[in-house]
Amino acid sequence: MATAKKKTVKKSATRKTSVRKKRKNNKHKSSKIWKLCQWAFYLGFIIFLLLAGYVGYCYLTMPNIQKAVSRTREPSTLIMAQNGNDIAKFGHVYAKVITPDNLPQNLTAAIISTEDHRFYQHFGVDVWGVSRAVATNIFHKRYAQGASTITQQIAKNIFLTPNKNVKRKVQELLLALWLEQKLSKNQIMALYLNRVYFGSGLYGAEAAANWYFNKSVYDLNMHEAAILAGLLKAPSRYNPLWQREKALARAKVVLQGMKNHGLISENQYQAALKQPISDGQKYRVTGGKHFAQYVYDEVNEILGERNDDIVVSTTLDQNLQETAERILQQKIAAAQGQNVSEGAVIILDKSGAIKAMVGGVNYNQSQFNRAVQAKRQAGSAFKPFVYLTALQYGFTPNSVVHDAPIRIGQWQPENYNKKYAGDVTLTYALAHSLNAATVVLSKELYLQDIAKNAEKMGITTHISTTPSMVLGTNNVRVIDMAAAYTSLANGGYAVQPYAINEIATRDGRQIYVRQSAPQVKILEPSIVRNISIMLENVINQGTGRRAKLPIFAAGKTGTTQNYRDAWFIGWTNQYIAAVWVGNDNEKPMHNVSGGNLPAEIWHDIMLTTIKNTPHGRSYDNLSNNPIDAIGDLIESTNADDDDAIGALIDATE
């Protein structure tokens, strides 16, 4: 019995100890959980404070909302060529203002159906729409659907910049909530209709109705209203004046949406499809649409938000612009069998003034400006930077370089015709665009120095200093290449291409005048003279013979791998022009090289400019003293060379 009692006491003690341990462990676990909860609370509170602070910062840095709302229309911007002729107009002066108590019913219904069918139900943000869009995007594993409300679109397009970042999105949400608190739904819709962009430089529904259908927005039938609403998705793609079939197909989608959302019946839907479409105003075809858009963007950067209607005087030579457009279109149309669909031309004078800018074959089909926005490989058009650097190192045009097969690591560049010339002069190597000789020469130079020369002469895109860079494997812009060659044409001075001379209000009050920047010499005159003579030889005896003119001309061809890009860039005594041809999708062309189609385009354009151009070489930045100029020329050239003697004679006439 005693033993049994002892066992019972032991078990009881063990049980009590176990219970104590469990309680202690549970207490320890509870303490841990409590601490974790505390830390989670503190962390959440800190995150909340940071988010609140960031939202507060976004709120404090928002634009002046009241001022922006008070503007009933986009101020007009009239852009004029150098001769005073109109090129384009953005915004409208005389468009009637749509008021909240008199919304155009057909267009309002079409836009609500297309852009925000819960417009009258949400508070500025469509929660259901956002949830649906998130689910759709997750399902498709890509951005497949958006959920911006009309109120958010107003906040984004009227008050904010187009930059996509967190700050802009936060401000967009804050502005949308502010608008919904301060304005009625009809006021928001009126603001939208007066300010939304309908393509062709048109802001506001009344201006768009006048332009596309030659009638007031209040007189639009359902079919016409659906076309205007459809434009908002992609104004250039669904332009009824130029893309009529696409515009009608899009309008049918809009009408179908109106029917699905119960805004019109089946009978109204069928009747709308049969309604006639009024003819718009006659579109006056003028040159320089890409240039006009480029200038308009520049104006917005210079002036920002504004209320005044303005007139912009530009550097554009309208005759030269229309000539460049016509020749580019004709030449590319004639080369369709060679699978080339696009091109770009930019023409500068020696100060950097843009005299012509062709951003593509047809502005109405594509507003993408290939002269300033496209980045393409330069090919051999980049080689002058290499030879220029060699001249700075002490090489001369008559220095000898060995043209033979060469390998650098796994890279083995070849000449265009897969033949090699052996020992050749730098002049010959550049004139005949010898790849192997250029790579051999570059091994005597620092690649960083070549890149620095290209950058200070005007190349703004990133230059990777790999061995292949000397053959033009880096992406460049057409406008930058034109600027770089201008530094050779003007005697070695840096230029910044510019298009605007003056901006004034319609009543003549001057707002902006371009100030001439001080000339900055970036290249020595002797270097410029030598590289100019070498590039003149490209046209006279090398790959650029199709660009030859009856006056002085210098330039360089460029062709990239598999004929994806073809260039010719060069200058006369008056102008510098860069020509690029290719395909937007970078598909190879059929045997289109810099020495054929681009050189021919360049030649035909420049030929029209030589009536008033002085003959002879352009060495107008030698010296103000004629005797010193002669001395400079003798010192920098070979007196036994016919070209050098000709240069001397031309410079002293």
Image (tube, rainbow, N blue to C red):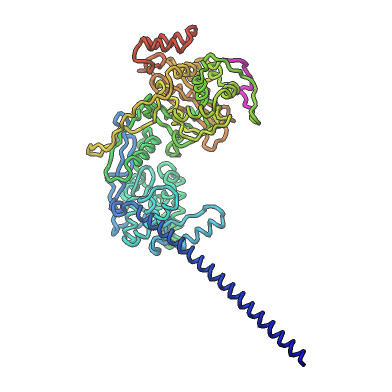
Q: Position of residue 351 (x, y in %)?
A: 36, 26
Residue pushed farthest top? 640
Q: Which residue occupies the foreground of this view, 42 or 462?
A: 42
Q: Which residue occupies the foreground of this view, 368 or 250?
A: 368
Magenta run includes residue 301 = no
Q: Which residue occupies the foreground of this view, 124 or 186?
A: 124
Residue found 54% across the figure and 67% down from its top: 36
Q: Main secondary structure of the magenta part?
A: loop
Left or right placement of residue 486 versus residue 427 in this view: left
Q: Is residue 110 visible?
A: no
Give the magenta-colored segment's residue range. 412-424
**The C terminus is located in which quarter?**
top left
Q: Is residue 48 visible?
A: yes
629 shown above or below 227: above
Q: Position of residue 515 (x, y in %)?
A: 30, 31
Left or right placement of residue 222 versus residue 383 in this view: left
Magenta run includes residue 420 = yes
Residue found 61% across the figure and 78% down from its top: 23
Q: Quadrant of residue 83?
A: top left
Q: Position of residue 180 (x, y in %)?
A: 35, 61
Left or right placement of residue 206 versus residue 347 in this view: left
Left or right placement of residue 508 versus residue 41 in this view: left
